[in-house]
Image (tube, rainbow, N blue to C red):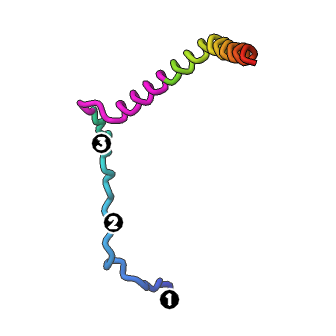
Amino acid sequence: MKIKPKLVDHSLFKKPSPVKPKRLEPPKLSTPSSINTSFYINAIGLLILIIGSLCLYQRFVDRNTIEIEKQNVILDFYQTVNQKV
């Protein structure tokens, strides 16, 4: 009585065949012949930044002259008011 009972008949199941791994192809890099729209958007943004910085720099340079002109206008107004009174 040393016989092991077979609960499952293994001949009914197929042995899995070895699976060959698929060879991975390197990703294809698409080199567009025309420049895409993101370049144009970046270029326009850069131009806006450059123009804005130039305007701010010009205001910084002219700040003293504008301040002096404002003071002169106030003094002229003060003198005309004093002359008429």
Are discs 2 and 1 less than 8 Å apart at CB?
A: no
> Of residues 13 and 52, which is closer to you in this image?
52
> Of residues 51 and 32, which is closer to you in this image?
51
Residue 47 drawn in magenta: yes
**Mark 3 or mark 2, earlier in chain:** 2
Query: Cα distance, mark 3 to mark 1?
Result: 59 Å
Query: Cα distance, mark 3 to mark 2?
Result: 26 Å
Stretch of the chain drawn in magenta: 32-51
> Of residues 4 and 23, which is closer to you in this image?
23
Relative placement, left or right, of 29 versus 57 is left
Circle 1 residue: 1
Q: Quadrant of residue 36?
A: top left
Circle 3 residue: 25
For the C terminus, which image quadrant? top right
Relative placement, left or right, of 7 versus 28 is right
* Vertical side of 20 occupied by 17: above or below: below
Query: Tag on residue 50?
Result: none
Callout 1 crowding tier (Cα within 10 Å): few <14, some 14–19, many ≥20? few
Circle 2 residue: 16
Q: Amino acid at mark 2?
A: Pro
Give percent across and percent down for residue 39: 36, 31
Relative placement, left or right, of 77 versus 2 is right
Q: Amino acid at mark 1?
A: Met
Depth-wise, is mark 2 or mark 1 nearer the camera?
2
